[in-house]
Image (cartoon, rainbow, N blue to C red):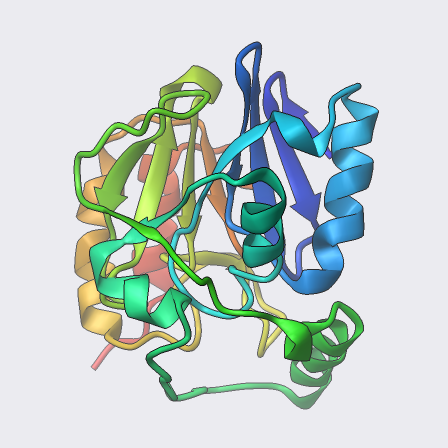
Amino acid sequence: MQLAPGLHRVGNDMVACYLVVTGDGMTLVDAGLPGHWKDLEAEVAGLGRSLDDIRGIVLTHGDSDHIGFAERLRRRNDIPVLVGHGDAARARGEEKTSPAWGRLRLGPTLGFLVYGMRKGAVRTHPLATVVEVGDGDVLDLPGSPRVLALPGHSPGSIAVHVPAVDAVFVGDGLTTRHVLTGATGPAPAPFTDDAAEALRSLDHLAGLGARWVLPGHGAPWDGGTAEAVRRVRAAAPTG
């Protein structure tokens, strides 16, 4: 799905990853679930490109619904998979976490779990090797992505800012569709390790001025970073 010139989404409002497309190749941000492989192939073919044009994968964090087909593509293309320092062990499958689910509604929760099963969530393979990145790093990949530390959802969560497409990819730093309640609009994401830290990290996004705020779950937001952050904070539980 093309969002803007050079900017494409793979997946849907349930789980999504993204392609930055340039004349020098493509950068993939996150890797969804294993079953999104066919969606990726279809999106790339529709661009008149091939998977060989993907030069690297940047993971916003190491959770299973973001690393889905990353190892498969890494091996196929012999490309780097980059992840924030604090999430490298998680992406390699060396660290297991069990964050609280929080509030939920039965229908949306079942819908999310069934979708995950259909897209092969249980077949996710951890990464054999990753390249660790940190706050402020500008990556030698198409679009020259810049890393912004965004800890909270996980210790090594990052945002990926690509000025060339006026977008910032936020993973689960925020959501626009709460997968457990079905609520839509910018809000804190579920399954977050440290909710207070996640809210503080939004300071790194508010002043970017990027038009597109692209989460791993929910509709693409094109109302700008400042308004997205304001709405997330307004939706956060108090007390």
Q: Count all numbered tags in the image, as a single digit.
A: 0
Of residues 48 and 163, the one drawn nearer to the viewer in this rendering: 48
Residue 199 figure quarter:
bottom left
The answer to whether 116 is drawn above or below residue 49 in the figure is: below
From the top left corner, tell me how far across and down residue 73 is, in percent: 61, 48
The answer to whether 232 is drawn above or below residue 143 in the figure is: below
Of residues 147 and 184, the one drawn nearer to the viewer in this rendering: 147
Residue 77 figure quarter:
top right
Q: Residue at x 43, y 16 (%)?
A: 164
Residue 176 is left or right of residue 187, and the answer is right
From the top left corner, tell me how far across and down residue 148 is, in percent: 24, 41
The outermost residue toward the top is 23
The answer to whether 53 is drawn above or below residue 179 in the figure is: above
Of residues 10 and 134, the one drawn nearer to the viewer in this rendering: 134
From the top left corner, tell me how far across and down residue 210 is, in percent: 37, 27
Viewport quadrant of the C terminus: bottom left
Residue 90 is left or right of residue 197, and the answer is right
Residue 126 is left or right of residue 111, and the answer is left
From the top left corner, tell me how far across and down residue 20 is, in percent: 54, 27
Q: Residue at x 25, y 28 (%)?
A: 138
Residue 217 seen from this side: no
Residue 4 seen from this side: yes
Of residues 140 and 59, the one drawn nearer to the viewer in this rendering: 140
Q: Residue at x 35, y 74 (%)?
A: 192
Q: Residue at x 39, y 68 (%)?
A: 92
Viewport quadrant of the N terminus: top right
Residue 173 is left or right of residue 133, and the answer is right
